[in-house]
Image (tube, rainbow, N blue to C red):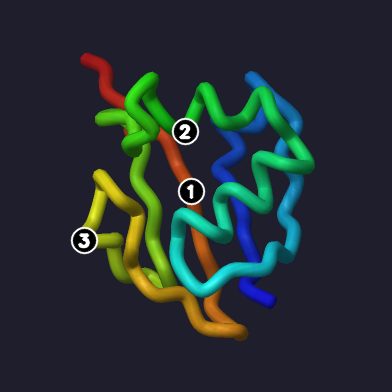
Amino acid sequence: MPHVSFTDNLQKHLPCPPQTAPGKTVRAVMYAVFEENPPLRGYILDDQDRLRKHVNIFINDVAISDRVKLSDAVAENDRVFVFQALSGG
């Protein structure tokens, strides 16, 4: 199963330890994660079920291309990394 991990910054707001989750697309993998951790969904997806503007997802160090449908393919041994963009001055 794909391995999913989250930045330390996101984990400050909500427990989301690294885990494996089934799925062949980013959406399927993330929905499996949300089943185990429902509050996490609100940090990752907006009210229209799209990736929030300040959140990025990478598959094996490559940014996903479909931020709306989350249809990027995920293979059995892929690593999915979710993080919130940070800004400041």
Q: Can you say whether 40 is above or below 5 in the image? A: above
Whichever of callouts 1 and 3 sits on the residue coming sooner in the sequence is 3
Residue for point 51% across, 74% down? 24
Pick whichever, 12 or 50, lies toward us. 50
> How busy is the neighbourhood of tag 3: few (under 14 within 10 Å), some, or many (20 plus)?
few
Mark carried by residue 44: 2
* Marks 1/2: CA–CA distance: 8 Å
Whichever of callouts 3 and 2 sits on the residue coming sooner in the sequence is 2
The mark closer to the camera, 1 or 3, is 3
Residue identified by numbered label 1:
82
Measuring from the top left, give residue 51's x and y in whole percent.
Answer: 34, 38
Mark carried by residue 69: none
Are circles 1 and 2 on residues that touch, CB within 8 Å? Answer: yes
Residue type at the position of mark 1: Val
Residue identified by numbered label 3:
65
Residue type at the position of mark 2: Ile
Measuring from the top left, give residue 87's x and y in whole percent.
Answer: 27, 23
Whichever of callouts 1 and 2 sits on the residue coming sooner in the sequence is 2
